[in-house]
Image (cartoon, rainbow, N blue to C red):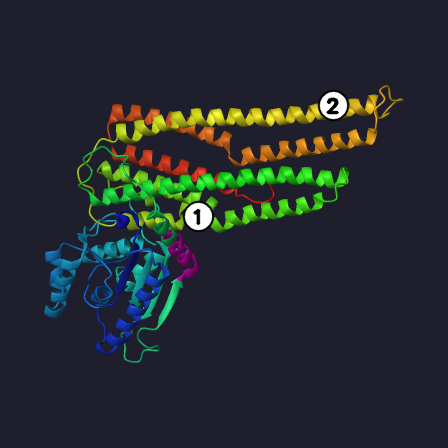
């Protein structure tokens, strides 16, 4: 199904509990406008609202989402029966209604360490604010803009989203102003408000968020066209977990898309290399052989090279090849963690560089890990560790063969260049009078000299372009990475055998795999196709 492989755009909500009655129409209209804008920005992506359904702004936003047919996920600060004590009769009925229509209703996990005094009401509401901020693409804040007083309100939730200013117990806070924006809808508390209710402003980097939304929507559009029939990395029996199935489907789709764009990228590199070699030959024919018409061939080859480069830019094949693989690998790690019964979040194990460079992937993982905790724990040694060890073993062999073939090709071209140079030297010595009188009479010395110049120049260019082409494939680095990861998974297999499937071991396993993926992305970004090849 198409829906199984689309990344939802998560709209988080935070806001004041006390909404002035006269402000409700303006705030309702403002929320509706912002949601419709976001829907228009992401036509291929489902919008989902993440909402703690507190009385006031939360319920107002939930009402608007229902009218716009936007699904709802309810994350509560405490158990529902306890939370219901916070509501008046009318608000309680709306709360119950939205809980019934929500796709999921669950209590926010503890993200920060429990304070020495134990769990308090303020701590619970602070954790739900962190959860909403950490798992949404965009945060809607119905807020007066004033600082908070208790460390657990709307102002703090905005700060969580923009600055990640909380003490995550399990890793690096995944949020900063560079990868999340807050749509601030002014919500006054006092009668002498300086602005009208519903006045919108953007906090954070809206340009960065637009880029995240565009890339997410672009992936969703492409993912619907991929066939995944019969593919699964997990053993039979995981079908009872819809979240696990969805993550695996998106991981498989992004992996397949990455391979498709990799083929386009390598095809572009090959065409640029061929065009460059032919351009050198055509120019030498024009310059040395006085074949004036070759100037037109040079122009045609330049246009062809430019066309290849523009195709690469328009198809975005290089970025998609790299980032879709990164998404596939990150989700594969998260899939295995969930299958293992672990609550570890891959998003919190990504390095700062990965969070900054591929923020849309970070947001995708956060969006797809919302909700219910993993079910039954399964052994991941055979399906994850051993499978990956075998994969890297085979990939290392294949990369080694490609590297050997590339070395042989470059070596042959180099020998040919040296051979032509020596032939040219011999020709000039014996036929051209380089040092002494020619000992071999040749008809039309200049003709053969021109032929040698053209051949030497063309073969030298071919040698350079072939070396550049293979260099952009990064085969030595890829081979080294495969060999290192093969040894790593062999080590992890031994650790699992001796110590069992602990949370610490799963963390080490996940972080190392995510780091290796980040390193691969880093050096592949330097190999962007351009006419300089």
**Figure check: 453 above or below 145:** above
- In what quadrant of the picture does the C terminus appear? top right
- Which residue is at 27% across, 77% downward? 190
Residue 347's tag is none
Of 531 and 388, the residue lying toward us: 531
In the rendered image, residue 138, in percent from the top left (x then y), is placed at 33, 59
Along the line of sight, the residue nearer the viewer: 283 or 405: 283
Please state the horizontal and vertical placement of residue 510, each as a whole percent of the image: 33, 36
- Circle 2 packing at 10 Å, graded few (<14), some (14-19), many (20+), is few
Q: Residue at x 47, y 25 (%)?
A: 400
Front residue of this view, candidates 471 and 497: 471
Is the stretch drawn in magenta largely helix, strand or loop? helix
Q: Is residue 38 above or below residue 463?
A: below
Q: Is residue 344 magenta?
A: no
Residue 450: x and y in percent read 77, 33
Q: Alpha-carbon neighbours of circle 1 within 10 Å: few (<14), some, or many (≥20)? A: some
Residue 335 in picture, x, y percent from top left? 28, 39
Above or below, 389 against 116 in this view is: above
**Which residue is farthest top?**
439
Nearer the N terminus, badge 1 or badge 2? Answer: 1
Mark 1 vs mark 2: in front: 2
Quadrant location of residue 248?
top left
Label 2: element kind: helix
For label 1, the residue is 357
Which residues, given as a range, are shown in magenta? 204-216
Disc assigned to residue 422: 2
Q: Horizontally, is 24 left or right of 91 in the view?
A: right
């Amino acid at each position: 199904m198409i829906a199984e492989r689309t990344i939802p755009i998560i709209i988080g909500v935070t806001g004041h509990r006390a909404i002035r009655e006269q402000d409700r129409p303006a705030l309702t209209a403002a929320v509706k406008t912002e949601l419709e804008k976001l829907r228009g920005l992401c036509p291929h992506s489902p919008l989902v609202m993440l909402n703690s359904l507190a009385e006031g702004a939360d319920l107002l936003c939930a009402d608007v989402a229902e009218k716009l047919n936007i699904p709802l996920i309810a994350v509560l600060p405490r158990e529902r029966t306890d939370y219901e004590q916070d509501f008046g009769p009318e608000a309680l009925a709306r709360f119950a209604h939205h809980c019934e229509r929500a796709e999921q209703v669950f209590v926010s996990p503890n993200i920060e360490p429990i304070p020495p005094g134990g769990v308090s009401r303020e701590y619970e509401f602070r954790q739900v604010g962190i959860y909403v901020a950490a798992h949404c693409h965009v945060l809607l804040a119905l807020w007066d803009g004033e600082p908070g007083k208790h460390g657990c309100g709307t102002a703090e939730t905005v700060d969580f989203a923009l600055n990640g200013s909380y003490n995550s117990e399990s890793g690096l806070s995944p949020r900063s102003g560079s990868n999340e924006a807050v749509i601030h809808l002014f919500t006054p508390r006092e009668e002498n408000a300086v602005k009208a209710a519903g006045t919108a402003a953007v906090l954070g980097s809206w340009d960065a968020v637009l880029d995240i939304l565009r890339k997410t929507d672009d992936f969703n559009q492409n993912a619907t066209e991929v066939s995944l029939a019969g593919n699964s990395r997990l053993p039979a029996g995981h079908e009872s977990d819809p979240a696990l199935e969805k993550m695996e489907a998106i991981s498989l789709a992004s992996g397949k898309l990455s391979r498709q764009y990799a083929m386009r990228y390598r095809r572009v590199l090959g065409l640029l290399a061929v065009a460059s070699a032919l351009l050198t030959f055509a120019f030498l024919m024009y310059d040395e052989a006085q074949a004036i018409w070759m100037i037109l061939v040079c122009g045609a080859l330049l246009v062809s090279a430019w066309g290849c480069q523009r195709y690469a830019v328009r198809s975005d094949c290089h970025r998609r090849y790299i980032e879709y693989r990164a998404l596939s690998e990150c989700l594969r790690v998260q899939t295995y963690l969930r299958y293992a019964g672990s609550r570890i979040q891959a998003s919190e194990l990504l390095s700062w560089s990965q969070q900054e460079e591929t923020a849309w992937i970070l947001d995708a993982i956060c969006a797809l890990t919302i909700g219910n905790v993993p079910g039954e724990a399964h052994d991941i040694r055979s399906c994850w560790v051993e499978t990956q060890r075998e994969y890297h073993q085979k990939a290392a062999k294949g990369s080694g063969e490609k590297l050997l073939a590339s070395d042989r090709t470059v070596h042959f071209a180099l020998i040919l260049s040296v051979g032509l140079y020596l032939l040219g030297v011999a020709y000039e010595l014996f036929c051209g009078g380089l040092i002494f009188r020619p000992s071999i009479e040749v008809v039309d010395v200049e003709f053969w000299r021109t032929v040698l110049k053209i051949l030497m120049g063309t073969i030298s260019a071919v040698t350079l372009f072939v070396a550049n082409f293979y260099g952009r494939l990064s085969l030595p680095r890829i081979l080294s990475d495969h060999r290192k990861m093969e040894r790593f998974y062999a080590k992890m297999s031994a650790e699992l055998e001796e110590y069992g499937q602990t949370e610490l071991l799963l963390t080490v396993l996940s972080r190392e795999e995510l780091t290796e993926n980040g390193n691969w992305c880093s050096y592949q970004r330097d190999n962007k196709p351009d006419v300089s090849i």
